[in-house]
Image (cartoon, rainbow, N blue to C red):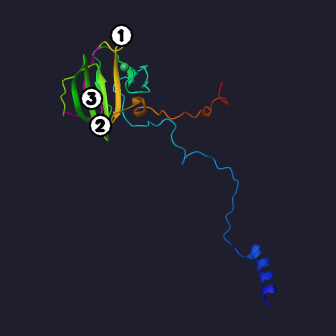
Amino acid sequence: MKVFPLLTVLLVLVPVAVPVPVRVTVPTPVPARGAGAPPPSSPAGGWSWPLSPRPAVLRGFDPPDRPWLSGHRGVDLRAAHDGAPVTSPAPGRVSFAGFVVDRPVLTVDHGDGLRSSFEPVDSALRAGDEVGEGSVLGRALPGHCGATPCVHWGVRRGEEYLNPLAFVMDLRPSILLPPVNPGSGQGGSG
Ligand SMILES: [Zn+2]
């Protein structure tokens, strides 16, 4: 019979006096800059472009639906000129240097099942040679893009062809951010 009054006292007292750990959601607008927001233009794969300066992409990655169908299992990068140096986008070891049919091909094994192939490239390297990121693999030869100097770059993981651009660019769906121009547009000195 004494439970009732005690309970009543507690119920009355609790919200007033006892600091109960209650999860409180405070709708305070916190400025979302600084920590947390990832840099919008961080390179996804961390590799470097195999041509310098950063080349234009003359033809993109267009893998076929079936292995036996034609497609474009890599990207064509514009070279500054025929004979331009082609560099390794990542460290690795040359796994193939020779002709595939009539095309001089150089393949670098980057580990983790990833391989880069370049063609047409004239190279003095041999299978087994180690290369670092940025090491010159060879020289771009004419022919793959007609009269335009270019190099075809393919990337495979195992037997699956991947888009090489994913290793040098952030290809995730882009979020259109409003332009941030602090200082411009408002109160700028004219
Ligand atoms: Zn190509």
Residue identified by numbered label 3? 107
Distance of mark 1 from mark 3, alpha carbons? 22 Å
Is disc 1 surrounded by few (<14), some (14 to 19) or many (20+) residues within 10 Å?
few
Q: Amino acid at mark 2?
A: His
Does the closest atom of ligand 1 sit within 8 Å of the Cβ of label 1? no
In the image, what residue occupies the spot 33% across and 34% down?
159
Q: For the N terminus, which image quadrant? A: bottom right
Whichever of callouts 1 and 3 sits on the residue coming sooner in the sequence is: 3
Distance of mark 2 from mark 1, alpha carbons? 30 Å
Q: Is residue 27 above or below residue 150?
A: below
User: Farthest top residue?
Assistant: 147
Residue identified by numbered label 1? 146
Is disc 2 surrounded by few (<14), some (14 to 19) or many (20+) residues within 10 Å?
many
Q: Return the mark for residue 1.
A: none
Asked which quadrant contains residue 175, the reply is: top right
Side of 77 where 185 appears, left or right? right
Indicate the position of residue 84 as horizontal and vertical percent values: 29, 18
Q: Is residue 71 magenta?
A: no
Q: Secondary structure at mark 1?
A: loop
Residue 65 in view = yes
Residue identified by numbered label 2? 110
Q: Secondary structure at mark 2?
A: strand
Q: Amino acid at mark 3?
A: Thr
Q: Is residue 39 above or below residue 108?
A: below
Is disc 3 surrounded by few (<14), some (14 to 19) or many (20+) residues within 10 Å?
many
Indicate the position of residue 6 as horizontal and vertical percent values: 78, 85
Asked which quadrant contains residue 56, the reply is: top left
Q: Nearer the viewer, residue 173 or 49?
A: 173
